[in-house]
Image (cartoon, coloured by chain):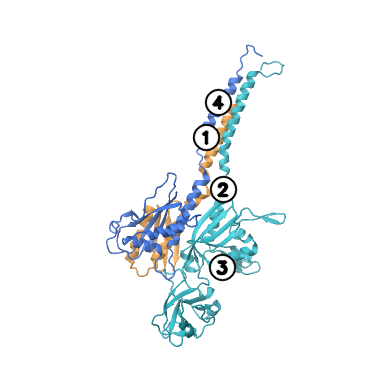
Chain colours: A cyan, B orange, C blue
């Protein structure tokens, strides 16, 4: 500008300044694109989903009783029924804790833990899952707790796609954190050792073994009578066999066999072409020991031809999905 | 002159953004980096082999060689196994993750 | 206003504008901005899924002495085909998609074994029974592996070069991608 006191801007200056401003605006628009991509929120949800998946599938969970450090007792979380169970359960994982399974296979889930998780979740209305599985700490707002994440966890069986369990809100937006895990469920908690029987020359009795010495690599299924009890079912029983059935005895394999209980309780009268034996863990307290083999003998009088083969309940393949948003 | 100042500030910003690409690692990348499944698989396999009591020692040595050499060539990991009478020692190193473990029987 | 004092304001403005735009263009083309979230998460999910499927196929069911995976590999080495392996792996990896006909994940498998006398490590494709599916350009394949222990490989001549019939551990490698 001319150095005088007329206070006027030259046109020259205005045009130059305008061009500068327009270019400045274009540049700012372009560079804001650089920064926006760094603020993405979706990474966080996938990370939480992955962590939740790992806790559910690979972690057996832990419960710690006791208030002082020297009396802390570590237990299975699904067994905790103390008054302040929410404080005693640290993590609720679903992996089975049978020693053989824990040592070698982190993808096998225990049906008992699954049932317990669903039960506790329905009592606490989602708080339990938020705190002990997602590890989502609430923000307290005027009396209500507000959680940062929402979840939907499903367990479906492979093959028929039927939903076994569901936790959380099934209505979820399209963009969520997601993880899918393939698992197998150990159903031996209260599921039968199924015996398919067919008429073959037999000796008037039928034997089902309970091997507690088989620690072999072959078997991931280890009968656990002290915690789960035993449940045996003889299926395809003919009416003649039903009429002749008298009771079930329990022996220890030895030479000669040692009779432990001549007539076990809870062996029901046959119905529906089945004979069932359902024994609680209390029955086995003190009468059996790890490392020995035992057997159940189904007695029929008079002698009936009985034969068949024993089949253990196989693991059930399933899919666990976690959605987080 | 103002244009010059703004250009310089954009360069500075670009430098920061570029550096952040090198330094930051997304969670998914760090998950892929940790060979969790490989280690679990290796432990499981080693235990299965060890528990085959019917194998004579030279067979177990051959299988140990199998695992060590295939790990080196195909999984890019150094594995060293020792079977003794009552325990197994596993050493695993893939350049990023190191594992030393003794399993007692 | 218009006199004979030289003013450069217009040109100064234009010069500043050109400088800024050129700098920004240079900056944008040199800093490579990957979309950080998308690609790695998909890889991670696929890899975890593949590993899970192989691990679950390797579970020995109660009452058996070897896992389904070991049986299938042993079958193939004895000259069988791999339809059952394909079917089980396909079930585990592709199940529960809306509509049963969608199979978005395809795979191919290799077996890696070692010859004891020569010390060579050999990699063979599970040729018979696998089609070579069309792989689209944008597919990002992921590799997952699993150790398979073979207790008694057959003594007959298997369809694999230099394969020893001794108890050994082989590595099964499966490549999967999402179409």
Q: CA distance from mark 1 to mark 2?
A: 24 Å
Q: CA distance from mark 2 to mark 3?
A: 35 Å
Q: Is residue C60 left or right of residue C80?
A: right
Q: Can you identify the residue that label 3 sits on?
A: A76
Q: Residue drawn at (38%, 65%), measured in percent from left and top? A: B49
Q: Nearer the viewer, residue C64 or A95?
A: C64
Of mark 2 and mark 3, the one earlier in the sequence is: 2
Q: Can you identify the residue that label 2 sits on?
A: A42
Q: Give percent across and percent down for residue A191.
A: 51, 72
Residue A209 occupies which quadrant of the picture? bottom left
| Pointer 1 and pointer 2 on the same chain | no
Q: Is residue A84 left or right of residue C133?
A: right
Viewer-nearest of labels 4 and 3?
4
Q: Can you identify the residue that label 1 sits on?
A: C28
Q: CA distance from mark 1 to mark 3?
A: 56 Å
Dot 2 falls on which chain?
Answer: A
Residue B90 occupies which quadrant of the picture? bottom left
Q: Marks 1 and 3: CB-CB under 8 Å?
A: no
* Viewport quadrant of the N terminus of chain A: top right
């Amino acid at each position: 500008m001319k150095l005088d006191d007329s206070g006027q801007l030259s046109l020259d200056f205005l045009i130059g300044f305008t061009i500068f401003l327009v270019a400045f605006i274009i540049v700012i628009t372009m560079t804001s694109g650089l920064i926006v991509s760094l603020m993405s929120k979706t990474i966080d949800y996938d990370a939480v989903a992955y962590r939740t998946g790992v806790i559910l599938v690979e972690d057996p969970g832990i419960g710690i009783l006791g208030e002082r450090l020297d009396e802390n007792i570590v237990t299975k979380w699904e067994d905790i029924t103390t008054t302040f169970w929410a404080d005693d359960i640290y993590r609720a994982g679903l992996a089975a804790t049978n020693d053989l399974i824990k040592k070698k296979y982190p993808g096998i889930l225990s049906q008992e833990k699954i049932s317990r998780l669903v039960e506790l979740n329905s009592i606490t209305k989602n708080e339990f899952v938020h705190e002990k599985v997602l590890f989502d700490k609430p923000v307290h707002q005027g009396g209500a707790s507000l959680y940062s994440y929402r979840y939907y966890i499903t367990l479906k069986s492979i093959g028929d796609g039927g939903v076994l369990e569901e936790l959380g809100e099934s209505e979820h937006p399209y963009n969520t954190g997601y993880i899918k895990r393939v698992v197998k469920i150990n159903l031996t908690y209260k599921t039968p050792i199924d015996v398919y029987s067919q008429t073959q020359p037999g000796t008037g009795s039928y034997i089902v073994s309970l091997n507690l010495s088989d620690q072999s690599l072959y078997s991931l299924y280890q009968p656990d009578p002290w915690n789960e009890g035993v449940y045996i079912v003889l299926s395809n029983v003919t009416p003649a066999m039903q009429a002749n059935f008298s009771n079930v005895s329990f022996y220890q394999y030895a030479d000669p066999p040692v009779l432990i209980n001549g007539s076990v309780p809870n062996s029901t009268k046959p119905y529906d072409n089945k004979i069932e034996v359902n024994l609680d863990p209390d029955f086995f307290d003190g009468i059996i020991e790890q490392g020995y083999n035992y057997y159940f003998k189904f007695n029929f009088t008079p002698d009936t031809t009985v034969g068949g083969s024993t089949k253990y309940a196989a693991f059930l393949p399933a899919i666990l999905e976690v959605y987080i948003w | 002159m103002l244009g010059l100042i703004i250009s310089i500030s954009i360069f500075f910003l670009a430098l920061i953004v570029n550096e952040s690409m090198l330094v930051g690692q997304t969670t998914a990348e760090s998950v892929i980096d940790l060979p969790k499944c490989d280690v679990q698989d290796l432990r499981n396999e080693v235990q299965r082999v060890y528990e085959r009591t019917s194998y004579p020692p030279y067979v177990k040595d051959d299988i140990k060689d199998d695992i060590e050499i295939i790990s080196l060539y195909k999984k890019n990991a150094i594995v060293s196994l020792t079977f003794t009478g009552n325990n197994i020692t596993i050493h695993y190193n893939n350049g990023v993750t190191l594992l030393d473990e003794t399993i007692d029987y | 206003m218009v006199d004979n004092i030289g003013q450069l304001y217009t040109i100064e403005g234009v010069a500043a504008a050109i400088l800024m735009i050129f700098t920004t263009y240079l900056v944008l083309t040199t800093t490579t901005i990957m979309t950080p979230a998308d690609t790695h998460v998909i890889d991670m999910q696929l890899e975890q899924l593949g590993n899970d499927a192989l691990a679950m196929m390797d579970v020995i069911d109660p009452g058996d002495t070897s896992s389904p995976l070991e049986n299938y590999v042993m079958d193939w080495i004895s000259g069988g085909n791999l339809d059952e392996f394909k079917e089980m792996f396909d079930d585990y990896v592709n199940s529960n998609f809306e509509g049963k006909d969608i199979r978005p994940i395809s795979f191919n498998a290799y077996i890696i074994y070692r010859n004891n006398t020569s010390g060579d490590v050999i990699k063979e494709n599970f040729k018979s029974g696998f089609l070579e599916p069309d792989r689209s350009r944008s597919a990002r394949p992921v590799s997952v592996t699993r150790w398979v222990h073979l207790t008694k490989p057959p003594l007959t001549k298997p369809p694999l070069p230099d394969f020893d019939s001794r108890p050994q551990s082989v590595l099964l490698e499966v490549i999967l991608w999402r179409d």
